[in-house]
Image (tube, coloured by chain):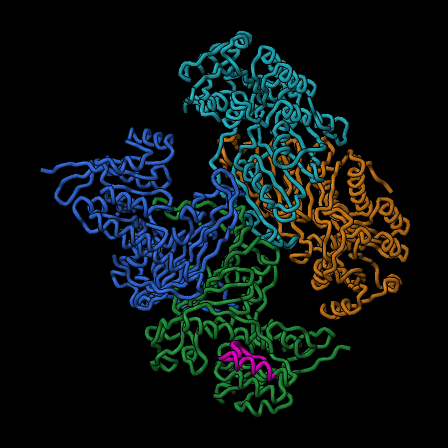
Chain colours: A cyan, B orange, C green, D blue
Amino acid sequence: MAATRTIGVAIDGATGRLGTTQHLRALLAIRDEGGLALANGDRLVPQPTLLGRDAEKVAALAAARGGLDWSTDRDACLADPAIEIYFDATPTGGRAKRGAAAFAAGKHVYVEKPVAETLDEAIAFARAGARAGRKGGVVQDKVFLPGLRKLNKLYEAGFFGRVTSVKLDFGWWVFDGELYPSQRVSWNYRKAAGGGLILDMFAHWRYVFDQVLGPIKSVSCRHMTAQPRRRDEAGRAFDVDVDDHAFAMLELEGGVLAQVSSSWATRVKRDDLLQIQVDGSAGSAVCGQHRCFIQPLVATPKPLFGPDFPANMPYHEQWQEVPDMEPQQNGYRAGWELFLRHVAEDAPFPGTLLEGAKAVQLAEACYRSDAERRWIDLPPLAL
Amino acid sequence: MAATRTIGVAIDGATGRLGTTQHLRALLAIRDEGGLALANGDRLVPQPTLLGRDAEKVAALAAARGGLDWSTDRDACLADPAIEIYFDATPTGGRAKRGAAAFAAGKHVYVEKPVAETLDEAIAFARAGARAGRKGGVVQDKVFLPGLRKLNKLYEAGFFGRVTSVKLDFGWWVFDGELYPSQRVSWNYRKAAGGGLILDMFAHWRYVFDQVLGPIKSVSCRHMTAQPRRRDEAGRAFDVDVDDHAFAMLELEGGVLAQVSSSWATRVKRDDLLQIQVDGSAGSAVCGQHRCFIQPLVATPKPLFGPDFPANMPYHEQWQEVPDMEPQQNGYRAGWELFLRHVAEDAPFPGTLLEGAKAVQLAEACYRSDAERRWIDLPPLAL
Amino acid sequence: MAATRTIGVAIDGATGRLGTTQHLRALLAIRDEGGLALANGDRLVPQPTLLGRDAEKVAALAAARGGLDWSTDRDACLADPAIEIYFDATPTGGRAKRGAAAFAAGKHVYVEKPVAETLDEAIAFARAGARAGRKGGVVQDKVFLPGLRKLNKLYEAGFFGRVTSVKLDFGWWVFDGELYPSQRVSWNYRKAAGGGLILDMFAHWRYVFDQVLGPIKSVSCRHMTAQPRRRDEAGRAFDVDVDDHAFAMLELEGGVLAQVSSSWATRVKRDDLLQIQVDGSAGSAVCGQHRCFIQPLVATPKPLFGPDFPANMPYHEQWQEVPDMEPQQNGYRAGWELFLRHVAEDAPFPGTLLEGAKAVQLAEACYRSDAERRWIDLPPLAL
Amino acid sequence: MAATRTIGVAIDGATGRLGTTQHLRALLAIRDEGGLALANGDRLVPQPTLLGRDAEKVAALAAARGGLDWSTDRDACLADPAIEIYFDATPTGGRAKRGAAAFAAGKHVYVEKPVAETLDEAIAFARAGARAGRKGGVVQDKVFLPGLRKLNKLYEAGFFGRVTSVKLDFGWWVFDGELYPSQRVSWNYRKAAGGGLILDMFAHWRYVFDQVLGPIKSVSCRHMTAQPRRRDEAGRAFDVDVDDHAFAMLELEGGVLAQVSSSWATRVKRDDLLQIQVDGSAGSAVCGQHRCFIQPLVATPKPLFGPDFPANMPYHEQWQEVPDMEPQQNGYRAGWELFLRHVAEDAPFPGTLLEGAKAVQLAEACYRSDAERRWIDLPPLAL
């Protein structure tokens, strides 16, 4: 007969934005639905313990969620046998060390991206998991975006014919704290805390390309600090010592070229904050986070170009929307379901720590490409 | 008292698309308005002679325009003292040699871009003009586009504050001749004729950047042949041996980064075939060939990013259009007026052959960057 | 050197609707543009002679078109050596006999469809042309409709994948002359004059299917007289003794099924008076006379069906329009150009009299299918 | 004084889509409103017992509906005297036998359509009911659709004048399970389970025609398997051995012709998934499941047809909508109310098993017409 068992999950950084609004919410939703149904019919109920530095904030959040366990003592959590999974959503700096410590304490470890600040650390972290015989994983929420799912279907259906090029544009304007408060936490802009746009966002682009758009072989990247002086949460001015804007070119397997722009200092006149265009011999697609539009070869228009012809076609209207075919999944919850099954019944899990290391590899290659002003290849990684 | 004098202009390649629909049209318009009023009140009336290889086509065009002079003999034209200006709008291949020969014959020389296929040829061409003591010039039509003029005004007014980055997207889908005839002449796709997208289009981007967006210091470029097999005007299949798609990153003076995409193999879901975005600390602009939209810092929105927030703002509507303030100029005619004044009264002329050589320098650097997989600097040029 | 020669064309039935508004107009347009340019550079100028029964009307039309030749004596026209082409746009009854007489007089013969009222007559007519060594042809104007051209491109591009079924809906409400005058000539409703909707319209469907949608192998048809009592041009009531409404099913080569509705007694709530839907494994198209819309598999929606779900999707908006890629041709003029070249330089001509006979074969099979209440096969035809 | 009594209803196939979302819901709604008010003022409360093969699923559904009786033992249910009505919503295969067994056990029998897979079985089933002296009935939900009700009113009001023709279009694209999961259960595509579009949908068309559009006298039908290979619920590929697409022509009493298209492999560019057009001398109607539009003779437009006239009228806008005049009924619930009254107080019931047999007769005639390539008459049926 079907059994129900609980599994303790420590959420480090529970009071952060992602920790609260995404991960804790996802776990509580699974819990409140009676747990996750496993393949054998059993139900697995996650039991969160909130972990943080500011006792007052952690306690308040725990209370507001109906009285959850909470702590400010990471070591104590790791020593608690009821906690089987350690999850880290704190700032990036030190993540690999925290994760390795959790492995050493016998925990399974699930972390926000990037898994580390350097490739060496990332590999060491992944190896620590392998040595400990515990499961490790990194959040890969973007592949669950409806727009990305639709794009994936187009690839699957062979819609593009031969894909020739890809463009990914991401970003919006993050205020510097002068006129309006910044919409991002200040540690994103500090090197010591593991900040930097490339480290943050190219961690996403790595799995988005590898899983949907085509594996990345090489990168040429250039970054800058568009807003070098900011004010933090307390209104204190500080100098930004990391990148907040990057342009890159990628070479994908099969010879496809990709162009990427990612910026916290750009203004948006396109359909979505994240927009991906794929051009192919048989058709093109332009997708945002949720919507996706296609233009097949047979409906491709023949615009006139010349000084006497202003935009003489409604270019935005010459695309057909791909309808919603599947119920939308929250990517964070979907990731938790996958990781819980990975832990509980050894189900396959795409976001292994090796994949997380690949994301760090890409970021590192971007920084090196900028420094050396040349293309950097991404060699295969293994543990 | 004001005098009227005529000036003979040989239009080589008059029956080509640009030759007929732009340059000949521009000269006839100036002629039909009684000539160009010079600074001293005199009027200068251009008298075109059509030059081409296909006698029947040239004769037909000459007849259709009310009986113009025409010829298929370039040498005879160059020997004709009534012809003071030699203009070349034939395919790029051999342009520098044709121009140098015209200089040698004592003509002033005005040419379509690019001025040559290699930087060495371009410099030699420019020097030939200097030696001959004749005026030389290259067409730079894009700066007269209303959208570029508006963008220029925004720079002039200091609208952007500190400019941080620029994006230029250009292109549309050029059919390969299978399903529909190609919209571009086949020589654009043949190396021997001086084809290639970079050679063609980056000739524009050089002066657009140098004059409007900021002088280019360095380039990293990657190109490809997205459509390797095409059919020509006669329906014959041929292999494309040049690039039809390029991604590039540019470093501008002052540390501004720019990203460029130029393609004859992309489909368009944006406002215009050519679109330039400039981001700055005080505001951003997105301009097409004719229209230009701005978003100042004080009207910059604060969009939410997250899987639960689909494109929840009308991003396209959060921009304000820059109104039309000047009558629209046709860039080709404006270029002719500038060059005619340059010849007749030594008025300043922005599109010197040295500037034309810079465009070739950029194209050459792009090709070299692709080959050597690194950034290429653009050193200053001089005669 | 290029020569210009005239070719006399007798237009029988010039004062009829099609004769005046389409055929005479087309010939005069060709004439007024200096004739048709042949492959060798010569120009062929058609010289129309108007032929009709009502001298007053014919003379008036000839005068209104700048003083054309005209006659009411068909035999005299056929005896005139300056007339090389006899064209028949009079009512269908007797057409094959008139055409055969023209062949006998040494003329080339071009006719409106249907070429005859019975298959035997049609074959005899085609054979008369072969015996006389003269060119024969039938008008096939519908394939030049922009909508049909676009549909053809979709087939050419393989858009449909495996085509499974076709639907053709044609018709509108033709008033019976009581409340409003009829919009069709009364002979369309009289058997003795060669009337009948099937004989008239299935003559089109035969070549539309054979050339675009797939060759017809078999037909099952049912017709009726929806409006059995009408008033003619003079307001006189008469009994309709032919069909004005038909439903049919067709089997095409390759096993594709088609459904056809054609009616002069139906009201229209669709995009166009003529609408064709093609369904295939990879996509569908819905085309009218001019516009064409597609829905590829990857953008096919998943509507809900059930009593609680009213039309809950904007079904009309889930299609993408195929853009206009070619200049529109008038099908009647295009037919004349093809036939003139066929006569003057033996250029290929799709609408031979054998093809015209196939159209009559289809109509005859429709009538027989109705009478015998079974499917009728269409065996191959030859002269 | 008014009495309340319960009546036991066994729902066979309760966990199927129709069983759960329509029939069980309808019965519970009647129950929860205190039962059905009979003519004498008594209230009849249906008490459902859920019957199915998968104990876990049946039990879960019973629990989720507040603890209903349930069983996996059909014989036991039939032996239970508290159960007076046996209702069958399982797959079609074997329905007539199940129903006959229920009659033999003394139950009243109500079934989903079609009542059987062959006419002989259907007649035998109906006779079994007559012999047993029990009431039998078949679901006829479509006549309660608001669109059909409005259409019925138009007939009743004599709106059409003399009806001349009818067109019924039904269908949408059912995915084959490759790119997206199929929206229909796989047994619909298996002959052994009673699948096939004609058997499924023409069961509806029979009573829709007989009750609303005119009794069917004869049919000519052609079917095909548009998607011959599919994946089932478990993702297993299988070969389809029944029809999923049919074209038909019908002859109705009074000489009216009808054309029917029904397909699970078509894409929809019309107002609704089910659309019926009725043309008559005094007006026409185009109705979907819910909405209905009319165009009377006096508002019929006079469109121009010709190559120079693209769709030059807004054909969709030239119709007037029939307003909603009655509250919408759910057809499944309405059917239950009728059948319960039929059982409880011998009220008249349109969907007798003889009518159900007529639907099977039509399907059988369709298949035979396809095989014999001719029209098949539908003789009157009697028990």
For the C terminus of chain C, which image quadrant? bottom right
The x, y position of residue C131, in whole percent, is: 63, 85
At 60% from the left edge and 88% from the top edge, which residue is drawn? C104
Q: Is residue D124 visible?
A: yes
Is A148 situated left or right of D321 in this image? right
Q: Is residue C124 magenta?
A: yes
In the image, C174 versus C98, the foreground residue is C98
Please determine whether, in this image, residue C116 is positioned above or below residue B333.
below
In the image, C129 versus C249, the foreground residue is C249
Is C125 situated left or right of B247 in this image? left
At 41% from the left edge and 62% from the top edge, which residue is drawn? D369
Is B148 situated left or right of B192 in this image? left
Q: Is residue B152 magenta?
A: no
The x, y position of residue B339, in whole percent, is: 77, 53
Please determine whether, in this image, residue A151 is positioned above or below residue A59.
below
The x, y position of residue C267, in whole percent, is: 39, 64
The x, y position of residue D98, in whole percent, is: 31, 44
Please determine whether, in this image, residue D138 is positioned above or below residue B77.
above
In the image, D252 versus A248, the foreground residue is D252
Is D251 situated left or right of C164 in this image? left
Q: Is residue D330 visible?
A: no
- In the orientation shown, which residue stands out farthest toward the left? D1
Q: What is the count of numbered marks?
A: 0
Instruction: Report which quarter residue D259 is drawn in.
Output: bottom left
For the N terminus of chain C, which image quadrant? bottom right
Please determine whether, in this image, residue A226 is positioned above or below residue C224.
above
In the image, D351 versus B70, the foreground residue is D351
Give the magenta range: C110-128
